[in-house]
Image: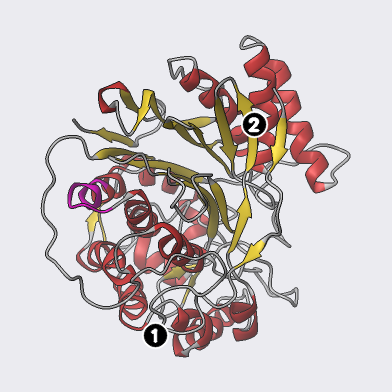
């Protein structure tokens, strides 16, 4: 067993989000995709195996499965899922935050020649420190645009529409969100904007209560109509920057312009005839996951050793000789389609509900700046071989996320998916017979200790 990182220069997406009128990406190696404009054909419901979704919040998972059912691929479903999570699980995902993904598309004619690659869009620190409650530069939209441009098959605007509709119409608070709301309700509703969303009648919403976010719906509508470039170089960006300053967590329009999502070679580990590809740095949860997997693949019973190796790898990457401090919350999901395309992601606001403040008039819950809070371990990975897709995992659980991802991947390759060690949590897709070709061998499993949802079909 060995660890390697694919050679080659890190490729930054510089031009992909510069203008709302972009129809695709012109960066080297890009496959041109249709990003804006109407669909050419009305979607039709597919029959048979369509793939599946596993996520920490049920409504987001259901919406992503609808994308698969109407012919969208794994990247299309992942983009929709992440935007809906920004509405339905704003404790852990949001336009103000970011994340990291591994995307896989089999075949030599795929964007990365059949090899998974990382898409990294971490919530960034502003150039100038300061503020009453320092906020991160929002990166979610930019990262999802890159994922769509690189691997998607549908125009980007249509992938935003479900999140906009859920935010505008409202939805019953899920158990997953209610569990996150309960311990932070007091401080959270100290912000007038957050109070208007999460305690609209004066009492904090509980499971089943209706959560509406009209300002966020308007922001999503503007993104859908004018494009992601409007957030990073346009009027919307100016509005968000001014609102962040009003919320005590300033960043500038220049911060929005200069921070871009990146395509980065994945961290690859050999596992028999398979290769496991974890999210790359600067999402150091991938290093932590690879270290844990390396120990467990040689000795599946050495959970303690795997945990120690995971923590040591992350601490070394951060230059933290004293080990890791307590790390913040995140969420994860995995998507696979009928052709064996797969996306595994971890998202975060760098704290539960980020800064706890909403940028006035935008509905955007601001993530905590990594200059003020330690970044989480974002851990996700895909297993694959020349036969196609084998497994995918996404993990969370603060300091245990890396161990959770490594443990879940080892279990998936061994033919099972036992619950990962506490406090880790993992979402898993495993196809023992590989995709495409053996859809009946696929299993979709949500962590039994969370209130998420696993959806597969045949």
Classify residue 150 by image quadrant.
bottom left
Residue 202 lies within the magenta run: no
| For residue 425, above or below residue 143 | above
x and y percentages locating residue 10 in the rendered image: 68, 59
Please report the residue visible at 56 percent of the width from the left and 45 percent of the height from the top. 329
x and y percentages locating residue 68 in the rendered image: 24, 48
| Magenta portion: prevailing SS class | helix
Using the rendered image of the protein, determine whether residue 122 is visible from the camera's viewpoint.
no
Q: Residue at the far front: name it.
A: 108
**Residue at mark 1:** 21
**Left or right position of 130 against 178:** right
Q: Nearer the viewer, residue 392 or 432?
A: 432
How crowded pointer 1 is (Cα within 10 Å; few <14, some 14-19, many 20+) is rated as some
| For residue 418, above or below residue 35 | above
**Left or right position of 294 against 46:** right
Which of the image's four quarters has the N terminus? top right
Which of the image's four quarters has the C terminus? top left
Range covered by the magenta-colored residues: 65-72
Query: Could you say which disc has been placed on residue 269 in the image?
Result: 2
Kindly report the distance in space between the C-alpha atoms of the residues bearing marks 2 and 1: 40 Å
């Amino acid at each position: 067993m060995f660890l390697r990182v694919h050679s080659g220069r890190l490729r930054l997406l510089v031009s992909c989000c510069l203008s709302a009128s972009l129809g695709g990406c012109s960066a080297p190696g890009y496959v041109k995709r249709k990003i804006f404009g109407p669909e050419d054909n009305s979607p039709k419901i597919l029959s048979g195996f369509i793939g599946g979704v596993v996520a920490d919040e049920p409504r987001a998972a259901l919406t992503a499965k609808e994308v698969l059912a109407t012919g969208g691929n794994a990247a299309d479903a992942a983009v929709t899922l992440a935007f809906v999570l920004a509405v339905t699980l704003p404790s852990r995902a949001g336009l103000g935050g970011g994340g990291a993904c591994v995307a896989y598309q089999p075949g030599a004619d795929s964007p990365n020649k059949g090899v998974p690659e990382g898409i990294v869009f971490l919530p960034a620190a502003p150039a100038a420190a300061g503020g009453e409650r320092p906020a991160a530069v929002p990166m979610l939209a930019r990262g999802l645009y890159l994922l769509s441009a690189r691997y998607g098959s549908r125009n980007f605007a249509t992938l935003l529409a479900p999140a906009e509709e859920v935010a505008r119409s409202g939805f019953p608070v899920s158990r997953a969100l209610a569990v996150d709301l309960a311990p932070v309700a007091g401080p959270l509703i100290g912000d007038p904007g957050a109070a208007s969303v999460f305690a609209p009648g004066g009492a904090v919403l509980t499971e089943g209560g209706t959560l509406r976010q009209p300002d966020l719906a308007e922001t999503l509508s503007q993104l859908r109509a004018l494009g992601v470039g409007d957030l990073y170089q346009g009027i919307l960006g100016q509005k968000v920057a001014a609102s962040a300053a009003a919320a005590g967590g300033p960043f500038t329009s220049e911060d929005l312009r200069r921070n871009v999502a990146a395509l980065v070679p994945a961290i690859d580990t050999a596992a028999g005839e398979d290769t496991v590809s974890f999210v790359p740095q600067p999402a150091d949860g991938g290093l932590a996951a690879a270290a844990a997997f390396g120990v467990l693949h040689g000795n599946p019973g050495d959970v303690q050793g795997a945990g120690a190796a995971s923590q040591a790898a992350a601490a070394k990457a951060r230059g933290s000789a004293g080990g890791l401090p307590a790390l913040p919350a995140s969420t994860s999901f995995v998507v696979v389609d009928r052709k064996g395309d797969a996306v595994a992601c971890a998202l975060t606001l760098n704290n539960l509900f980020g800064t706890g403040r909403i940028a006035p008039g935008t509905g955007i819950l601001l993530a905590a700046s990594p200059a003020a809070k330690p970044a989480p371990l974002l851990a996700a990975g895909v297993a694959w071989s020349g036969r196609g897709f084998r497994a995918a995992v996404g993990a969370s659980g603060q300091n245990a996320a890396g161990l959770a991802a490594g443990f879940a991947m080892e279990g998936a390759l061994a033919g099972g998916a036992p619950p990962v060690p506490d406090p880790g949590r993992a979402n898993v897709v495993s196809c023992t017979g590989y995709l495409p070709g053996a859809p009946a061998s696929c299993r979709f499993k949500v962590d039994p200790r969370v209130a998420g949802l696993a959806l597969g079909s045949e």
